[in-house]
Image (cartoon, rainbow, N blue to C red):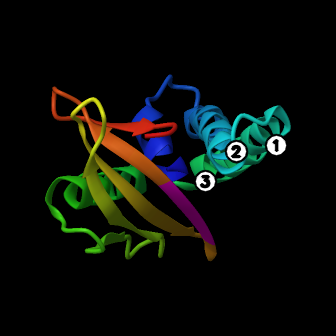
Amino acid sequence: MLCAGLLAACESDGYGNDNELAGTIIGAGLGVALGSAVHGDGGAAMVMGGLLGGAIGNSIGSRMDEQDRRRHQQAYYQAMNNNRDYDTAGWYDEQTGARGSVTPQRSYTDRRGLQCREYQQEIWIGGRREEGYGTACRMPDGSWKIMNNS
């Protein structure tokens, strides 16, 4: 979840710190959602999730370059659009050694009639593994939106 959100939000402002800022913001939001999903509506869990997610997102954002984000985004869309449940799509950067994968876990139709998929993904950057879980639903325009609780 964290990784997909990070990738979707990164656009350049020309100052060089966009990846960290986007990672922090997206990670914090996804951490709040994860804290809420794991512990219901508990405010403390949401705050802790937000803080932890922001820190992890910042760390990932500062270490992923544009090509790695593009490779991960391509694997994400390949997995979500074309792969069967538990069929992994991966990527690897020979120059940096960064790699990652996205694995759809379960597909279903939600109460609004949207096609949704739970997924797991991981990114290895600088020898460190970051893992995320989430649920995304296909919007009418064909894009995938990460959902808080589907």
Q: Residues within 10 Å of mark 1 (few under 14, many from 20)?
A: some
Q: Which mark is residue 35?
A: 2
Res 74 visible: no
Q: Position of residue 117 (x, y in %)?
A: 32, 52
Q: Quadrant of residue 76?
A: bottom left
Q: Which residue is mark 1?
A: 48
Closest to the observer, 94 or 60: 60
Q: Which residue type does callout 1 highlight?
A: Met
Of label 1 and label 3, which has the lower sequence position?
Answer: 1
- Real-space CA distance between mark 2 and mark 3, rounded to the nearest whole angstrom: 19 Å
Question: Does residue 131 show up magenta in the picture?
Answer: yes
At a point 43% along the width and 29% down the height, the residue shown is: 11
At a point 45% along the width and 64% down the height, the residue shown is: 121
Mark 2: secondary structure: helix
* Residue positioned most to the front: 111
Q: Which residue type does callout 3 highlight?
A: Ile
Tally the marks. 3
Is the residue under label 1 in contact with that under label 2 (CB below 8 Å)?
Answer: yes
Q: Position of residue 63 (x, y in %)?
A: 59, 55
Q: Which residue is mark 3?
A: 60
* Residue positioned most to the right: 44
Q: Residues within 10 Å of mark 3 (few under 14, many from 20)?
A: many
- Real-space CA distance between mark 1 and mark 3, rounded to the nearest whole angstrom: 18 Å
